[in-house]
Image: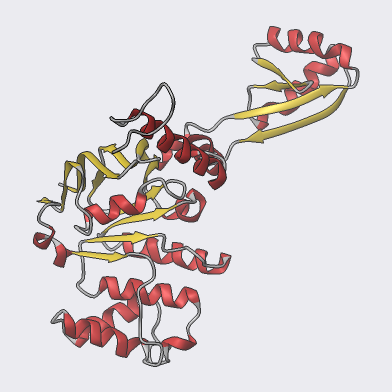
Amino acid sequence: MDAIATKGLTKRFGDLLAVDNLDLRVPAGGVVGFVGPNGSGKSTTIRMLLGLLSPTSGAGEVLGSSIARPERYANRVGALIESPSFVPSLSARANLRSLAALRGLRDARVDAVVETVGLFGRDRDPVATYSLGMKQRLAIAAALLPDPELLILDEPTNGLDPAGIVEMRSLLIDLGSQGRTLMVSSHLLSEIEAACTRVIVIGFGEMLFSGPLSELTTRTSAHVRLAPELDRDAARLAEILHVHGYKVHRTNGDLLVDAGAAAAAEVNRIAAQGGITLRMLSAHEETLEEVFLRMTGATDGDNAHIRSDQRGRRRRRLPGRRSSTGKEAAHA
């Protein structure tokens, strides 16, 4: 059974189509990365899965129960949405005991989650003395109190320094190895790449990729960039490399050869055998992060412009608007 499955899940906020006909499938067990740029619909999707928002259309199931009836699975799901509030003057243990009491759980669960998230030894210190990374661990401990089958974490590395991110990755791997299902959202693939077995990539509410991380790796590209010492030799060098079976492109005066770093030495020899001296030779292999950016957009600024354009097109299509003059109808 899939831990999460949706069909045509859609959410609109006025002119904004936040989630667009999303078909999700999260198999039970392991860590699944749910990635996309800021504003891509990740948090909206998570809130619909948890019953905090109602979809505009479509359907979904969590642990075999419809998202229209979240009370049927609420006690089997743990979630970290944004940054939960704790009483700063109380210790982590006291905060967790209060939350456990509200849920009718025994204090033994507090001992278990403190150990699981690595706060043992600092659990009796006031939360006010905690670093951001420790507060994130405490938040995950709170989500683990009901011993959930499914753990949904929305941006758990947000705001952490590099050391905190590494620690969070280690914790996610440990939790995934315990037989739970983790769905971890992030706007940066690199932050959760090491912890994930599968990845789901969305952009502007649409599914861009879903599958094993190894399958996404096959979408990476590699090239060798080179330039002859004399610009007039560029065309001849491209032809020589083509004869040897290489695909060559011209870009900004340089040559790009579709080949990995291992081919750089051979490319250099081919040029030398043809009597051509190179003034530049470099190899580049695309990272998963670069694939992610290529799929979703380079920057938050780029994505904001795309969202703005989408809203503008949506407004122009709304009934009651005058396309000939661009003026809104009186009651639009």
Residue at the front extreme? 330
* Residue beneath the point at 27% across and 71% down: 144
User: Which residue is nearer to you in this view: 180 or 85?
Assistant: 85
Asked which colour scheme the image uses, the reply is secondary structure
The picture places residue 208, in percent across and down from the top left corner, at 39, 35
* Residue beneath the point at 31% across and 31% down: 318
112 vs 88, left or right, is left
The quarter holding residue 83 reads: bottom left
Q: Is residue 208 above or below residue 84?
A: above
The picture places residue 211, in percent across and down from the top left corner, at 34, 38
Q: Quadrant of the C terminus?
A: top left
User: Which residue is nearer to you in this view: 173 or 39?
Assistant: 39
The quarter holding residue 141 reads: bottom left
* Residue beneath the point at 72% across and 13% down: 241
258 vs 184, left or right, is right
The picture places residue 138, in percent across and down from the top left corner, at 37, 77
User: Which residue is nearer to you in this view: 208 or 164?
Assistant: 208
The picture places residue 67, in percent across and down from the top left corner, at 15, 52
Q: Is residue 314 above or below residue 53?
A: above
Count of labels shown? 0
* Residue beneath the point at 37% across and 26% down: 322
252 vs 193, left or right, is right
Asked if residue 210 shows in the view, the reply is no
Asked if residue 262 shows in the view, the reply is yes
